[in-house]
Image (spheres, rainbow, N blue to C red):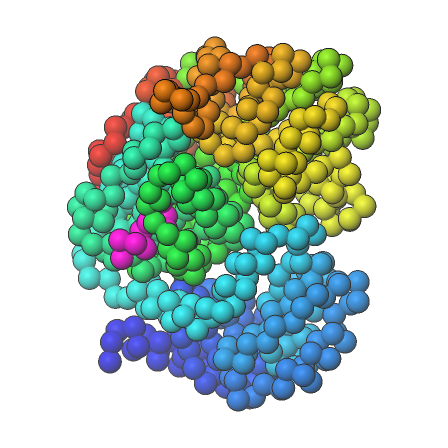
Amino acid sequence: MSSVDKRLEELQAEIQEELPSDISVSDVKYEGPELVVYTRDPKKFARNGDLIRRLASKLRKRITVRPDPEVLSPPSTAEDEILDVIPEEADVTDLDFHQDTGEVVIEAAKPGMVIGRHGSTLREITQQVGWTPEVVRTPPIESSTVSNVRNFLKQEREDRRQILERVGRQIHREELSDDEWVRITTLGCCREVGRASFILSTPETRVLIDCGDKPGAEGEVPYLQIPEALGAGANTLDAVVLTHAHLDHSALIPLLFKYGYDGPIYCTEPTRDLMGLLTLDYLDVAAKEGRTPPYDSEMVREAIKHTIPLEYGDVTDVAPDVKLTFHNAGHILGSAVSHFHIGDGLYNVAFSGDIHYKDTRLFNGAVNDFPRVETLVLESTYGGRNDYQTDQEDSERKLLEVIRETHDRGGKVVIPAFAVGRSQEIMLVLEEAMREGKIPSMPVHLDGMIWEATAIHTTYPEYLRDDLRDRIFHDDENPFLAEEFNHIDAGEDERQEVTDAGPSIVLSTSGMVTGGPIMSWLRHVGDDPDSTLVFVGYQAQGTLGRRIQNGWDEIPVNGRDSVGRSNTLTLKMDVETVDGFSGHADRQGLENFVKTMNPRPEKVLCVHGDERSVQDLSSALYHNYNMRTFAPKNLETFRFK
């Protein structure tokens, strides 16, 4: 018998000892980081609301209780009883029964009413029918991504259970080494923005954090083939942790499965869905531009199938000697500061991912309250000495002024924006400004993936600011449903109609003008001196967006002329940059993030910024807060214990 099977037997005996004599345990299994307890008495379990909590506390495990399939009532009977328990105002849209696990997935417009106060309605459902309820939200705006992900995971339930059981056994395997050390190896995003990727390793475990591409630099990918990463084989990795879905962090996650990785990906639920959306679009853009994609769509599906979603604040075992906790990063939907607790109090490391320290219209500011952090790996996108962003109110005022002036000239305002995060932030500013009469009401056209990304935001309002979440719960107040917003879904014909019509605002991907529908808008509107191109987000070195910001007015467009030269467009529209809408903390925000940590980290690695930014921030933190700081290069390894 393996050590894992022996431990499961011991756990089953311990659990049975803790339970009243009239509650039986028929099986105990690991599924990913959770311990799943099967019982023939699910109704009795549910009547004792504190029982699971007490077991989880005693065993220091995340516990899920499921009914033994043999004791379940038929779905047809259970459905009526469940609907009798749930208040009608919850607006249940679907019930999906899974006989193999005894779970019923309840989809509802108001899932809070299905859950009840402290889970009271869920317990009542199990008391009535025995089935274990799981609740998901019906998207207020229909989302093909959310629907496709849910349907795919439903189809792959059996495969996914096998994956989770295998992962669970790996997490809870016996530790083999008596050595104690912690190392971080940098695979990308050091003294550069993009291709974020790190290896966190111990004698027992290797975890990959992020695996992104580099905007505007085709072919520059993380150094995955070195021995510390995939050089010894992809399955020597225990886990992959994804801080958020932007492509400079997520684009090459599916590539890992092409190389043979078959383990878990830990991220938040919205990050999982957004990763699927953005990586599939990444493949589509590559194909349209005649580039060979690094992987195919099947690998994206594998990545989604291997994802284990975690909520903010949940402490989760991801290896025998590593616990992971996600905290809000304030950057985009589902973005997470990733905190690793290593060994039995041996060492603590936090990876910031990308952070925004102050509250924004969309999100609460990044969390920096941890019990312990000895080393912080900190993004430095705006870490330069003079990288101070405009105050958000001033930024909004300037944007609205540009819009009013362009509207009065009869022109169009074209805003290149990332589909995820900045677009929704700008949408909230525009909706409020038009509702309050600060700018004239006019069409706001959303091109590329922006509408779909917005639908995903409304599916997960619990990740948004409290006041925005509350507005989304009421259809008549949902700002994303304002009548001014128009989803461009008819391609070039619709873009031409918009061009020929009166003043309007266009929000379009890609945010750094590296391809996608923004190139079409430049062709349509670029030669109109009455129109304005407004940059509201970071433009990386080497991107066309940065070059336009720096004064380029000869813009390469698709195709070649009769003598084989690349076609170009002379840009005649105004070009404006409005700082303050970035999803990244500025220099002061980064310093404040570190300054207000209690206790402060002993060491800080400044990454994800150009050479000037990381060195400036590293120097400032060293001088101002007396901590050891580094501005590492790619392929460096740091030992911390």
Q: In this picture, is 341 found above or below 416?
A: below
- Front-lying residue, 505 or 165: 505
Residue 254 in sight = yes
99 to the left or right of 499: left
Residue under the point 31% across and 41% down: 198
- Front-lying residue, 581 or 427: 427
Residue under the point 20% across and 62% down: 176
Q: Residue furthest front?
A: 562
Residue 255 highlighted magenta (yes or no): yes
User: Residue 450 in the image: x percent, y percent?
Assistant: 59, 39
The part of the image, by quadrant, that contains residue 288 is: top left
Number of residue marks: 0
427 to the left or right of 617: right
Residue under the point 50% across and 80% down: 100
Residue 388 in sight = no
User: Residue 88 in the image: x percent, y percent?
Assistant: 79, 67
315 to the left or right of 434: left
User: Residue 356 in the image: x percent, y percent?
Assistant: 52, 31
Q: In this picture, is 60 found above or below 237?
A: below
- Front-lying residue, 526 or 260: 526
The N terminus: image quadrant: bottom left
User: Residue 586 in the image: x percent, y percent?
Assistant: 50, 22
Q: In this picture, is 503 found above or below 326?
A: above
The C terminus: image quadrant: top left
Residue 112 highlighted magenta (yes or no): no
Residue under the point 50% across and 48% down: 277
The part of the image, by quadrant, that contains residue 31 is: bottom left
Q: Give the range drawn in magenta.
A: 252-260
